Image (cartoon, rainbow, N blue to C red):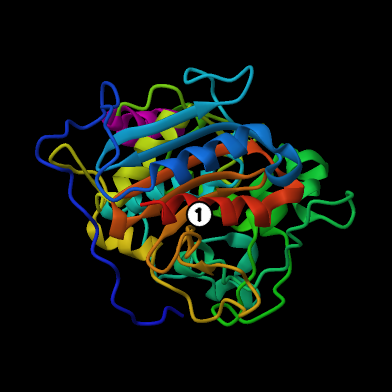
Amino acid sequence: MAVLETLVELPVQPKLTPWPTESWPQGDLSAGVDADALDQLLSKALTNPDDLGETHAALVIQGGQIVREVYGDGFAPEKTYPSWSMAKSITHALVGMAIADGKMALDAPVDVAAWQADDRRNITLNHLLQMASGLRFREEYVDAGVSDTIEMLFGPGKSDVAQYAIDQALEHPPGTFWSYSSGTTNIICHLLAEALGLDQGGMETFMRERLFRPLGMHSPIPKFDPAGTFIGSSFCYSTARDFARFGLLYLRGGVWDGEQILSPEWVDHARSRLSIVPEEEPMGYGGHWWLDIAGPGSFSANGYQGQYIVLVPQKDLIIVRHGASEEQKDNVRAWLADIAECF
């Protein structure tokens, strides 16, 4: 399913820049950056809601140092922000750890009892991670009854989000059709907990001990459904700085302060382009990460209301943005690309 391509080399942490485990180092803009254009774009984000919706936080990091950080009225660095679908990329990291531990297999059919009597038994973990399971799921954000997303998160499926998605019928042979699905991620979260043998409390401990704490991420608040499944499709609150820490882990190829938290191959899995993504999609897709929002080689964690962690390896750049911009997504994406162009 993935097109063979040469991936952009990921930058290493500059030797004189400390890792932000305790606090983020502050830096100046490097030579050649268009500071005036950058500041105008950040000002626009806070003063032009008609164009960009509400911008609550914007954080720009280059070379592992914060070079710009702004917040809207009533928002601040210590405030936690909703992830929406940026949580999918966090789920990708957790699955990578389980695979490294030998608890999950990427290309083996997943063990779902309800699927064994039909062709759903051929769905692999990789199909799920690449949104190519073939399962029916309507990723709409409209009235209940039309949107499986709303039905799953806020309607009849909210008591067991994974089971709601597991119950969906197969519309396409696995691996042949790409369809973005929050239900897919919640199936993964259920399978992950089963593979690790963890209940809700154990799963949260796993997240904190293996991912959050090593990075100095102390703010994340993952949400679970009544069945005990991490709602990895949508709900992990965090500060903008902690979301940036998570982005830095991927930008550094899974390394954090000398420790290999994720394998470099797993980071490459996130950013390897799928050939079956429809041409009309404005961005490419990899493994629970989006591609190309800030030009070729960039990859990003994207959220429904305009939440973004954008990584631009060629420029050693991270852009984190939080807000409420359901109707202005195209404008926000263009704004993010313009931010990157300043560097």
Residue 128's spot in the image, x, y percent?
A: 53, 64
Q: Is residue 175 above or below residue 269?
A: below
**Residue 191 in sight here:** no
Q: Quadrant of residue 196?
A: top left
Residue 84 in the image: above or below residue 251: above
Percent across and percent down for residue 86 are 53, 45
What residue sits right under mark 1 in the picture?
A: 338
Q: Is residue 342 above or below residue 203?
A: below
- Dominant secondary structure of the residues highlighted in magenta in the image: helix
Q: Nearer the viewer, residue 204 or 340?
A: 340
- On the picture, is 160 further left or further right than 244? right
For image coordinates 30% across by 71% down, the residue present is 7
Can I make out residue 110 in this image?
yes
The residue positioned 54% from the left and 71% from the top of the image is 123
Where residue 331 sits: x, y (%)?
66, 53
Label 1 crowd bin: few (<14), some (14–19), many (20+), radius 10 Å: some
Q: Secondary structure at mark 1?
A: helix
Q: Is 311 colored magenta in this rendering? A: no
In the visual, does 325 lie left or right of 96? right
Magenta range: 203-215
Q: Amino acid at mark 1?
A: Asp
Instruction: Give x and y (percent) for residue 303.
Output: 60, 46
Instruction: Give the residue at x 52% y 51%.
Output: 336
State the residue lying farthest toward the left: 15
Q: In the figure, is residue 203 to the left or right of 40?
A: left
Q: Residue at x 76, y 62 (%)?
A: 138
